[in-house]
Image (cartoon, rainbow, N blue to C red):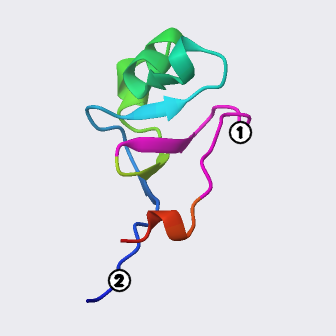
Amino acid sequence: GVQTCALPIFRVRAPGDVISLPGKDNGHKTIKKLFQEAHLPSFERETRLLLALGNHVLRAEGFSSEMDVPEIGRASCR
C-alpha cells in the first residue's frame, strides 16, 4: 500500500490539545491549562499559533522552546 507520514502543522488551539512538559504534571499539560496559568486573555488563547502533530502540541507561540519535543521521523509514518 501507499505509505503516508503525519507531518506537524501550524494551527490554533483545539479541544484535547496537550503538550509535554518534563518534570511537571506527569509530563504533560493541556494547552487550555497552560494558557490559563499564563494568564492569557481569552482572545489571545484563540489566536496563538501552535505547531502540532494531531492533538500533541510540539511548540506554542510565546512559550519556551525548552519543552520536551518528541523526535519526528519514521515512527510517525504508517
Q: Is residue 29 above or below residue 78?
A: above
Residue appearing at x 29%, y 32% in the figure: 16
Residue appearing at x 41%, y 73% in the figure: 5
Q: Which residue is mark 1?
A: 65
Instruction: Indicate yes or no whether the magenta region holds residue 64.
Output: yes
Image coordinates of residue 56 in percent, x first then y, are 43, 42
The quadrant of the rendering that contains the N terminus is bottom left
Image coordinates of residue 33 in percent, x first then y, are 42, 16
- Residue type beneath disc 2: Gln
Name the N-terminal-most of marks 1 and 2.
Answer: 2
The quadrant of the rendering that contains the C terminus is bottom left
Asked whether the viewer can see residue 38, the reply is no
In the displayed structure image, the side of residue 69 where residue 17 appears, left or right: left
Residue 20 numbered tag:
none
Residue appearing at x 47%, y 21% in the figure: 29
- The chief SS type of the magenta part is loop
Q: Is residue 38 above or below residue 77?
A: above
Residue 65 figure quarter: top right
Q: Is label 1 in a helix, a strand or a loop?
A: loop
Q: Residues within 10 Å of mark 2 (few under 14, many from 20)?
A: few
Q: Which residue is mark 2?
A: 3
Magenta stretch: give its range: 55-71
Residue appearing at x 60%, y 26% in the figure: 21
